[in-house]
Image (cartoon, helix red, strand yellow):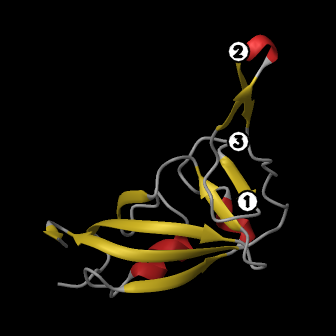
Amino acid sequence: METANGTRVKIRFKCRLQDGKVYLVGARDTLDFVIGAGSVPPALETGVLGMKPRERRTIRVPAAEVNLFPFPRGSHFAMETESPPGTGYEFGPGEGGDVSLSLSKPFREPLPTGADLYFEVEMLAVEGMNIN
């Protein structure tokens, strides 16, 4: 079965900017939606039409549609590396033999204004047809 208007789908995705920086959307990397319902940008809906489970595509979502993506404002960041945002821990000897702990978080920068996103999409399910 392949996707068509009105089909419920589940995709796995990774977003990139044109220059290759990874654009993460929180901790979520899957999305369920009905094609044609308007819950995701039109370019993403159109881009998944005709896909079958396990199929992969890269879909460009123009800057004018990026704000239509269904995630909380402020959750989008471009990253310099493939690593997701998180907390790093460094342990070392402290004064008097105690253990010293320092916390660090990777630098995150906001999505540049007017930037298109490239969704690397894998179709996981089409109306109940799941991949294993």
| Disc 3 + disc 2, Cβ < 8 Å | no
Name the residue located 85 percent from the left edge and 61 percent from the top edge.
113
Give 37 or 14, whichever is nearer the viewer.
14
Task: Indicate the position of residue 25 as horizontal and vertical percent values.
Answer: 58, 53
In this figure, which residue is indicated by the disc labeled 3?
Answer: 74
Estimate the x, y position of residue 33 in percent, counting from the top left.
Answer: 36, 60
Disc 3 marks which amino acid? Gly
Element under disc 3:
loop
Question: Considering only vertical position in the picture, is 39 above or below 90?
Answer: below
Q: Is residue 9 left or right of residue 96?
A: left
Quarter of the image where one finds residue 51: bottom left
Residue indicated by mark 2: 98
Relative to 49, residue 116 above or below:
above
Residue pointed to by mark 1: 79
Residue at image x 80%, y 51%? 110
Distance of label 3 from label 2 (alpha carbons) = 39 Å
Mark 2 crowdedness (10 Å alpha carbons): few <14, some 14-19, many ≥20? few
Q: Residue at x 75, y 46 (%)?
A: 106
**Label 1 packing within 10 angstroms: few (<14), some (14-19), many (20+):** many
- Could you tell which of marks 1 and 2 lies nearer the N-terminus? 1
- To which quarter of the image does residue 112 belong? bottom right
In depth, the one of 45 and 93 nearer the eye is 93
Which marked residue is nearer to the observer: mark 3 or mark 1?
A: 1
